Amino acid sequence: MIIVFLGPPGSGKGTQARQLSEKLKLPHIGTGNILRREVQAASTLGLKVKDVMNSGNLVPDADILELMTNRINESDCKSGFILDGFPRTTKQAKSLDEILEKSNRQIKRVFNIKVSDAILIERLSGRRTCKQCGTNYHIINAPAKKNKDQCDKCGSELYQRADDKVATIKQRLKVYEEQTASLIYFYKQQDKLIDIRGESSIDRVFKEIEGNVSRQ
């Protein structure tokens, strides 16, 4: 089973994808996490995309496609996988279909999580990340318990990622809307797209997703 999660930054698609991954025992492939690891490792690709990511723009299709083709062809993806953050453009979606066709696979569901811009900005601008272990916090919804500036797990400093600053968030949302409008239409035409309201509680959103996964 192959499932795709779409949604603007901060919509909660990563959280929902992880939960569904655990439920279905399928690999969760998040492009954001993969790219950030490349940047932290200062790999050739990481150095190439660092400035693009920090400015809120999309990483070029060729780089993403190379990264994702390698990942979904690994042995643990033979029975299926859950994509989070990919594809981001219609070109990427068409390329993904072509890749999957080579192994007689296809996408079953595409969940489009919808959240208002005002809530997205609040969610993202309040996020803080541990410099050492990468644990995420939120200054309002999930603050560090011991010290607001230190990680509860390892005690390291918390910081605001460059792509979580308000100006960058607005740019990210603008780019997302411009780039994915045709992608959403693409999956609607394939009768695979399911809109999910992402402003409810995590559990309520997951219950709706779970019900749609089992629908034939």
Image (cartoon, rainbow, N blue to C red):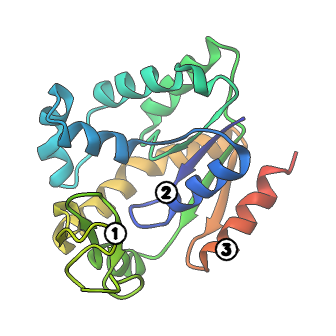
Q: Residues within 10 Å of mark 1 (few under 14, many from 20)?
A: few
Question: Can you give x and y, in whole percent of width and height, for residue 65 in the image?
Answer: 38, 26
Identify the residue position indicated by label 1 in the image: 153
Q: Residues within 10 Å of mark 3 (few under 14, many from 20)?
A: few
Indicate the amino acid at tag 2: Gly
The residue beneath circle 3 is 203
Q: In the displayed structure, does residue 122 sit left or right of residue 112?
A: left
Q: Nearer the viewer, residue 31 or 195?
A: 31
Which of the two labelled residues, at mark 2 and mark 1, occupies the earlier sequence position? 2
Residue name at image x 45 percent, y 22 percent: 69
**Disc 1, SS:** loop
Residue that lies at the very extreme toward the front in this rendered image: 154
Badge nearest the viewer, 3 or 1? 1
Marker disc for residue 14? 2
From the viewer's perspective, is residue 34 above or below residue 77? below
Q: CA distance from mark 3 to mark 1?
A: 24 Å
Query: Which amino acid does the dot numbered 1 rest on?
Result: Lys
